[in-house]
Image: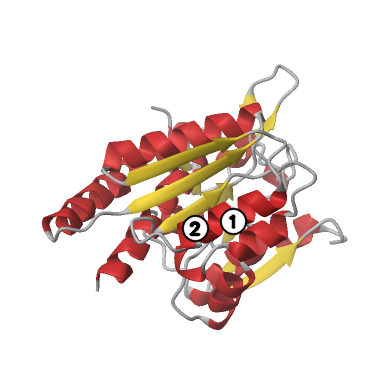
Amino acid sequence: MTNQENQRGQIIDGVALSAQLRSEVAARVQALKARGRSAGLAVILVGEDPASAVYVRNKVKACADTGVHSVFEKYEATLPEADLLARIAALNADPSVHGILVQMPLPKHINPHKVIEAIATSKDVDGYATLSAGELMTGAPGFRPCTPYGCMKLIESTGVDLRGKHAVVIGRSNTVGKPMALLLLQANATVTVCHSGTADIGQHTRQADVVVAAVGKRNVLTADMVKPGAIVIDVGMNRNPEGKLCGDVDFAGVREVASFITPVPGGVGPMTITMLLVNTLEAAERAAT
């Protein structure tokens, strides 16, 4: 290996870290079962969105692989909103179900906010409901949204202490950008949030020890925008002109500058489902105390 290759950023392997965390989940599931308890996740899919079907299949398989009991319910796209809300109410009252996940997007006649808010806070393993967001905001115990939670685990795996570090989050969505910023604040980083209204994103990222790119736009972060030695986490899921999966970061260029970088695929993606399992297990453990 040449000296130049030695200096390239180290890849943070989300597949390997995910496997390690899932083995820990499996062990804790077995410990629960030894006490006569189980961990249960209900997954609801409404409609025929092909990407959603793949995501749900992966979630159900992850449950099976770790011993988490899963209930998968699939409904036609014409399902009335009232029927879906009634089903959520029934699952809220079911003691064998510790987490409820309704796969997004939903058909247009169903209000996603109403559906998310209908899930009991104790079972909101996606961490999207207003009360869950408030718990994260105030530092109260609660469920952290799975993707930013997974990003934090990836950063932790580098061994870098975030205290006093400058972190930049590109993106301000309720599902990734905002909760990501809050989790970084909890880890004592100084946080800047950039977005489509930011005049010069590079001005901020060039000062950052950690950059999390989460906007869903190819090459939003290029090598000239990265401080040498920074940690770069790529949450994006896009397709390049050849149809190949890629992230928000110009991986080849940024890897030459960063100290650590996540690939797409194989970085953040596997961690999202893993943290869903962690949240479900934590819900079951709370219910068992």
User: Are the residues flagged by discs 1 and 2 in contact, CB closer than 8 Å?
Assistant: yes
> In the image, which disc is placed on residue 90?
2
In the image, residue 84 sits, relative to residue 6, either above or below, namely below
Q: Quick one: 136 or 90, which is closer to the camera?
A: 90
Quarter occupied by residue 106 = top right
Q: Quick one: 244 or 139, which is closer to the camera?
A: 139
Quarter occupied by residue 285 = bottom left
CA–CA distance in space, label 1 to label 2: 6 Å
Quarter occupied by residue 223 = top right
Q: Is residue 99 left or right of residue 282?
A: right
Helix, strand or loop under label 1: helix
Helix, strand or loop under label 2: helix
Q: Which part of the image, by quadrant, shows the C terminus?
A: bottom left
The residue indicated by pointer 1 is: 86
Disc 1 residue type (three-letter): Ala
Res 179 seen here: yes
Q: What crowding class fits label 2: few (fewer than 14 Cα within 10 Å), some (14-19), or many (20 or more)?
A: few
Q: Is residue 287 left or right of residue 221?
A: left
Where residue 36 appears, x then y in whole percent?
15, 58
Disc 2 residue type (three-letter): Ala
Where residue 253 appears, x then y in whole percent?
64, 36
In the image, residue 204 sits, relative to residue 254, either above or below, namely below
- Which residue sits at x=31%, y=69%? 287
